[in-house]
Image (tube, helix red, strand yellow):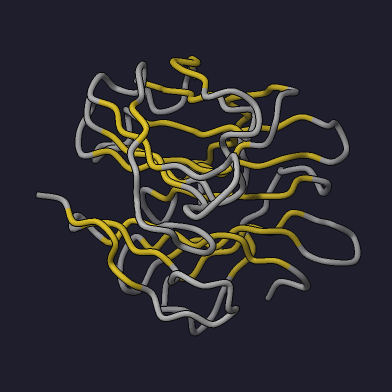
Amino acid sequence: VFAAHGNTVDAVTSQMAWVAGSSGSDSKARVIRTVDGGTTYTAATGTISSTFYAYDVWAESTSTAWVTGYDVGTGHQYIYYTSNSGETWTQQYDTAAGILHDLYFLPGNNIGWAIESSGAILKTTNAGGTWTQVASFGAGIIDTYSQAWFLNENVGFITGDGCSGSNDKFSTTIDGGVNWTKRSLPCTKGPISFYGNSGLIGAGNSSAVSQIARIIFAFS
C-alpha cells in the first residue's frame, strides 16, 4: 500500500487497525485503515498535507484516531485528530522544534503524552485539545526509536536505542512525566519496545542485522 515507508500500526481489535507513514515519489502522507483484519485497506489521509511524514498513529476506534509527524513543506511538526474515519483531520499541535515520534494515551484517551526529538515531553488531559510541555531531556537525547508507555497517570517509561551513544536510555517517572530518572539496561541494538504489560523487549546484543528479540526487563 505504501510506496516507501509504513512507519506505524495501531490495532484497535483483531479486525480493525490504522497504519500511517509516507509514500515514495511524491512524499505524500498516507494514513490507511482496515476493518477486515488486513484483507483490504481504505485511504484515511483526508485533509492532511501531502508533505506530511507520519511517524505514529494512536487509534481509539474505527472512526477516531490521532497521528503525529513532520511536515517537510512547513518545517513544523504536528498532531492531527480525526473523529470521522480520516475524512477530515483537525490540527491539535504545531511547533517548529524537532520531530514528534511517539504518542501514548491511557484508556479513555483523555490523558496522553507525546515525545519530541528535541527532547520535550508533551502531555494532554483533554484528548489532545491542548498539549503542554511537562519536561525536557534536551536535544540529542530523544531519538527516532523513542517510545513512551504509562501504567497510569503518574507512572511511566521512555525507551530508545539501548546500547551506546548519547541516545542510550531507559527512564522512568512517578509524577506524570514532570521528572524522570535514568535507569541502566543490558545492551541492545536498535529500539527497545514494550511487551504488553509484562516488560521490555530488545533486538539482541550484537551489531548483526538479524537478532532474536529478548526480554531484557520484567515489571514486578
Answer with the quarter of the image where residue 215 lies.
Answer: bottom left
The total of numbered circles placed on residues is: 0
Closer-to-camera residue (31/114): 114
x and y percentages locating residue 174 in the rendered image: 23, 24
Compared across the picture, whether 184 is left or right of 74 comes to left
* Residue 147 to residue 27: above or below: above
Closer-to-camera residue (156/37): 156
x and y percentages locating residue 101 in the rendered image: 58, 43
Answer with the quarter of the image where residue 200 lies.
Answer: bottom left
* Residue 159 to residue 126: above or below: below
Closer-to-camera residue (14/53): 53
At x 32%, y 36%, the residue is 109
x and y percentages locating residue 107 in the rendered image: 24, 40
Compared across the picture, whether 13 is left or right of 169 comes to left
At x 24%, y 59%, the residue is 196
At x 49%, y 62%, the residue is 9
x and y percentages locating residue 82 in the rendered image: 53, 41
